Amino acid sequence: MDWMLLVLETNMLTQKLDLEQIQKGAFPDSNFGGTTKIGDIISSVLPYIFGAAGIALLIYLILGGFQIMTSRGDPKAMQAAQSKITNAVIGFIIVFLAFIIVQLLGQVLGLKGTLFSQIFGGN
């Protein structure tokens, strides 16, 4: 009989929470709490991806420059360093163009929160 009293007492003390309250409590300062749209999640992650690409460009440029300085006139080492710098710049151009294309598509499709809508107004 004591276990029944414990169960009844426990049920009276618990409060009911729905999924939205749990998500808001788990992610209080983020956009993830309460949103289930994949577009919103991707939009909030994209700036970090582009920032990481910029940091990677900087690292590869520094490494390529260091390889050029330490090549001591060796043509193969010089070629490898120049190739590293060239590939880093090409990769950054691709990422930059991808960013511009994503922003333009967002503007054309009328999505909120794109860079162009923040600068020029609109949706």
Image (cartoon, rainbow, N blue to C red):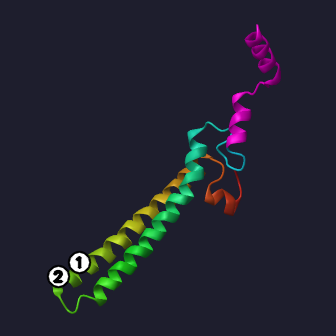
For this orientation, the residue located farthest to the top is 1
Q: Residues within 10 Å of mark 2 (few under 14, many from 20)?
A: few
User: Magenta segment: does it hold 117?
Assistant: no
**Spatial CA span between label 2 and label 1:** 6 Å
Residue 80: give its label: 1
| Relative vertical location of residue 61 with respect to residue 118 in this rendering, above or below | below
Q: Which residue is mark 2?
A: 76
Q: Residues within 10 Å of mark 1 (few under 14, many from 20)?
A: some
| Relative vertical location of residue 20 with respect to residue 88 in this rendering, above or below | above
The reply to whether dot 2 and dot 1 touch (C-beta < 8 Å) is yes
In the rendering, at what x and y percent does residue 50 appear? 50, 62
On the rendered image, what quadrant is the N terminus found in?
A: top right
Which range is magenta?
1-26
Tell whether 66 sits left or right of 34: left
In the rendering, at what x and y percent does residue 41 appear? 58, 45
Name the residue: 62% across, 55% down: 114
In the rendering, at what x and y percent does residue 38 appear? 56, 40
Name the residue: 63% across, 47% down: 110
Most foreground residue, 84 or 20: 20
Most foreground residue, 2 or 43: 2
Q: Quadrant of residue 3?
A: top right
Name the secondary structure under disc 2.
helix
Tell whether 17 sits left or right of 113: right
Name which residue type carries label 1: Ala
Name the secondary structure under disc 1.
helix
Name which residue type carries label 2: Lys
| Relative vertical location of residue 19 with respect to residue 63 in this rendering, above or below | above
Tell whether 69 sits left or right of 35: left
